Amino acid sequence: MPTVKYTAGFLMLWAYCFAGGPGHLVQIHGIMDSGKYQQILNQNLTASARNLIISRGWVFQHDNDPKHTARATKEWLSKKHLKVLEWPSQSPDLNPIENLWRELKVCISQRQPRNLKDLEKVCMEEWAKIPAAVCANLVKNYRKRLISVIANKGFCTRY
């Protein structure tokens, strides 16, 4: 699959998804460190969880990026009483949102934005079009994907 590259700059995005659909898509300006990551979570994730009345049994997943594993981030997550999925280092990236990032890239390449401003607009429009059913299916099949990877000792699976 060809990738979409732009010489005029780049666009860094953060987003989340849950069984009810895609969450907010946020453009990141500058370098994302632990403080900026906490700010994004505070402004987007916790408020959405309350507004969407997600059950108390939900678990937050992110990878082992240094801003995610920083002591300050861990303390912030603990203070907010957010349960975080334990994720071993050097593990396959099985976060369901990776599937959504791929879908977004495919949609972007089909629309062929001409500049950075157009790219941002297309990203926001295409993200908003992702059906809730797609996210529900990713969450529903997540356990099966994890079991498959564990059974295959971390090597490739059909997922």
Image (cartoon, rainbow, N blue to C red):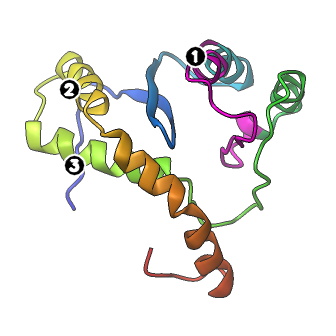
Label 3: few (<14), some or many (≥20) within 10 Å? some
Label 2: few (<14), some or many (≥20) within 10 Å? some
Residue 35 position, x and y percent, is 73, 18
Cα distance in 3D space between marks 1 and 2: 26 Å
- Callouts 1 and 2 close, C-beta under 8 Å: no
Disc sitting over residue 51 in the figure: 1
Image-quadrant location for residue 151? bottom right
Identify the residue at image location x=22%, y=19%. 121
Mark 3, mark 1: which one is toward the viewer? 1
Task: Tell me which numbered mark, 2 or 3, is placed earlier along the sequence.
Answer: 3
Q: Report the residue marked by disc 2.
A: 122
| Residue type, numbered disc 2 | Val
Decide: is 44 above or below 102: above
| Residue type, numbered disc 1 | Asn
Image-quadrant location for residue 105? top left
Identify the residue at image location x=57%, y=60%. 93
Decide: is 79 above or below 70: above
Label 1: few (<14), some or many (≥20) within 10 Å? few
In the picture, measured across the screen, residue 100 lies left or right of residue 153, that is left
Residue span colored magenta: 43-68
Which quarter shows the N terminus?
bottom left
In the picture, measured across the screen, residue 15 lies left or right of residue 75, that is left
Q: Report the residue marked by disc 3.
A: 106
Task: Tell me which numbered mark, 1 or 2, is placed earlier along the sequence.
Answer: 1
